[in-house]
Amino acid sequence: MRIRTAVFPVAGLGTRFLPATKTVPKEMLPVVDRPLIQYAVDEAIEAGCDTLVFVTNRYKHAVADYFDKAYELEQKLEKSGKSELLGLIRDVLPAHVRAVFVTQAEALGLGHAVLCARPVVGDAPFAVLLPDDLIWSRGRGALGQMVDLAGRSGASVVAVQDVPPEQTSSYGIVAAEAFAEGAGRIRAIVEKPRPEQAPSTLAVVGRYVLSARIFDHLASIRAGSGGEVQLTDAIAALLASEPVLAYRFAGRRFDCGSRIGLVEATIRYALDHEDLADEARAYMRAALSE
Ligand code: G1P
């Protein structure tokens, strides 16, 4: 199983970051010097994807502009011999990778956003990455680990992590069979259950490798939690005919859909950054003792 297509649902409103997101899509908020969407794109490319499908809405031109070629800027940098900067903007999307933009005309939910990508994805298995979930890892990226597992097992794979019981209502929650080598077969999956109804505290994180049969379920399920078409509900339907694995990835996930998550990610990446680590560490020490 080779996963070549990655879908990025980027049509969300980002109300938690207002007023910044009045004009800047939340996927364009930076962590150090790169927008969130770039981290997810790099993870997908590292995992072997070469077709990136962005599901956007009419307010998200900035995402398409970002991946477009910036002719004037490139010419200017070329003329002034600033090859390092030139490399930085060219690396946004390597030459072998193509970006496709699909519009989600109505905000009908994550499942509906993924369904909008169907004409581009076709019949092959594909990946979904939610750029809000930033996954930091020193080795192979989380999606790469999942693609490897999908290749070995032939099954769909959903990333999971343990969360405190009181947080189950913010996530898809899975009940899985015993885990071996980080993965366990999912028996049940439910979107945002209250703690007393949750089958476990194992939460879905925004990385999926899915069989294309998910589209039939997305097309036929009804609106679920929050009145939206939920990807989780389509996965629940898929379980009846195919195995789906829950996978505890190696790496650390930052919930950059929340303000504190974005702050934590910024600190983590600054501490890990070649140019910034020493100053960032010194400043943090000083700030904590103020
Ligand atoms: C979405 C999914 C949910 C998943 C979460 C991970 O929810 O619907 O199942 O656990 O992403 O970040 P959202 O955070 O978009 O409400």
Image (tube, rainbow, N blue to C red):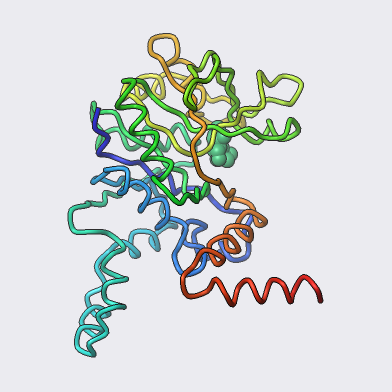
- In-image side of 49 versus 263 (left or right): left
Q: Nearer the viewer, residue 158 or 146?
A: 146
Relative vertical location of residue 178 with respect to residue 120 in this rendering, above or below? above
Residue 263: x percent and y percent?
63, 61
Question: Which part of the image, by quadrant, shows the C terminus?
Answer: bottom right
Rendered residue at 72%/26% (across/down): 194
Q: Is residue 234 above or below residue 32?
A: above
Percent across and percent down for residue 246 are 49, 25
Coordinates of residue 270 in the picture (x, y in percent): 55, 67
Q: Which image quadrant: the N terminus?
A: top left
Q: For ligand 1, give the image quadrant.
A: top right
Q: Residue at x 27, y 84 (%)?
A: 82
The residue positioned farthest toward the top in the image shown: 240
Residue 147 quadrant: top left
The answer to which of 196 and 225 lies nearer the viewer is 196
Q: Please determine whether, in this image, residue 281 is positioned above or below residue 204.
A: below
Q: Nearer the viewer, residue 240 or 10?
A: 240
Q: Residue furthest right?
A: 290
- Give the mark count: 0
Q: Quadrant of residue 84?
A: bottom left
Q: Residue at x 29, y 28 (%)?
A: 125
Residue 28 in the image: state x and y as whole percent. 47, 61
Q: Nearer the viewer, residue 51 or 19?
A: 51
Where 181 sits versus 92, above or below? above
User: In which quarter of the view is residue 226 placed?
Assistant: top right
